[in-house]
Image (tube, grey):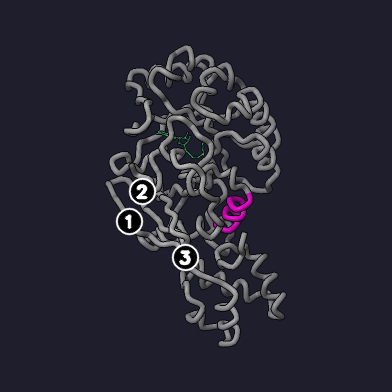
Amino acid sequence: MSMNNIFNYQLRDLEQYFLNIGQKKFKASQVYDWLYKKRVFNFEKMTNLKKELIEQLQKDFNINQIQIVKKQSDKTANKYLFKLEDGQFIEAVVMFHDYGTSICISSQVGCNMGCKFCESGRLKKIRNLETYEMVEQILLIEEDIKRRIFSVVIMGIGEPFDNYDNVMNFVKIINHDKALAIGARHISISTCGIVPKIKEFMNEPLQINLAVSLHAPTDEIRNQIMNINKAYNISTLIETLKEYIAKTNRRVTIEYVMLDKVNTSVECANKLADLLHGMNVYVNLIPYNQTNNLGYKKCSATDLQKFYDTLKKRHLTVTTRKEFGSKIDAACGQLRSKEVEQ
Ligand code: SAH
């Protein structure tokens, strides 16, 4: 990672930078205060820094390199298209809930996981996002909506655990009191199930939520819809989640997208309940957002209800994800780069 964008820096890294150039480390807190509290993205306007230091910072760092190029809104959500410095595009969505505003950010340009029902994966991964490109999605959206974000989900384009280091760096920055101070419990990472990274994640000293896209109760079904299952099958994944729960004492969210005639039968619900029996999890049923390009269909409200009721009867905690932004193609699995529209 090239470190020279200022939004790549955790406070302790910036302190180290100042020490390296023979300055006091509290300068890092001053710069952080300008960036994250006063939202001044121009070194020249950091009036408590000396002129020579400002010149040095201008030489050593970049600020602000991604841009909002399009915004679409409906009552509950805004979707933003961002252009990156190298001409690539990504999307992020902000959602307005009763309890506050949340944002769903992208972690990669394209995605290599190849889930058959997901629009984002139609564009293969071009590259990982750098930390600053994730931080700036939040800063630019907050500036646009003129309010602060309450929670962040890393569930936009990309597989966050395929960009582990930059995502962790990002999370540590937005969580830091002197930066965005977004509480760890208000940050969620969603993974399709990259087992070695879940193992690494359980050792992080952070109280961030983990969500796992399970989407099927058997390998037979999961193999059909998610390539990752061929690398880490369901029993390996579930064993790892049990280890995660034991180690962190945190509840895991199990995401389950309802694909008509694929994984929505009552039999599937019962198998899912068997699989998750006794685990500290909560199941989030996701109504499928249909797209024109993939062959999958949304299931009926009756099927969804039956599935839900079956899990409830089996004593699982279960919710159905509220649909946000589907009118503006901003819902789960609909984000993609406009540049690949065909
Ligand atoms: N790569 C990560 C995060 C991105 S996707 C992951 O796989 O978890 C966020 C969630 O939306 C995942 O659970 C994904 O499977 C789901 N999803 C993808 N396409 C969808 C669609 N068209 N409708 C509803 N959910 C979808």
Residue furthest front in the image? 342
Q: Report whether 14 appears left or right of 103.
A: right
Q: Counting residues from the N terminus, which is met first, the one under dot 1 or under dot 3?
A: 3
Upstream in the sequence, badge 2 or badge 3?
3
Relative to 6, residue 69 above or below: above
Which residue, given by chain and number where applicable, does mark 1 sit on? 70
Where is residue 210 drawn, in percent x and y?
A: 57, 39
Q: Residues within 10 Å of mark 1 (few under 14, many from 20)?
A: few
Q: Are marks 1 and 3 in contact (CB under 8 Å)?
A: no
* Nearest the eye: 5 or 138: 5
Whether label 2 lies within 8 Å of ligand 1 gets the answer no
Q: Which mark is residue 65?
A: 3
In this view, the residue in front, 173 or 229, is 229
Q: Earlier in the sequence, mark 2 or mark 1?
A: 1
Contact, mark 2 vs mark 1 (Cβ under 8 Å): yes
Closest to the observer, 234 or 151: 234
Residue at image point 37% right, 53% down = 81
Task: From the image, tell me which residue sits under label 2.
Answer: 338
Task: From the top left corner, tell me how far across and down residue 28 is, in percent.
Answer: 62, 72
Residue 17: image tag: none
Q: Residue furthest bottom?
A: 51
Spatial CA span between label 1 and label 3: 16 Å
Q: Residues within 10 Å of mark 3 (few under 14, many from 20)?
A: few
Region rendered in magenta? 165-174
Magenta-drawn stretch contains 207? no
Rounded to the nearest angstrom, the CA distance separating label 2 from label 1 is: 10 Å
- From the top left corner, tell me how far across and down residue 246 is, in percent: 69, 32
Q: Residues within 10 Å of mark 2 (few under 14, many from 20)?
A: few
The label nearer to you, 2 versus 1, is 2
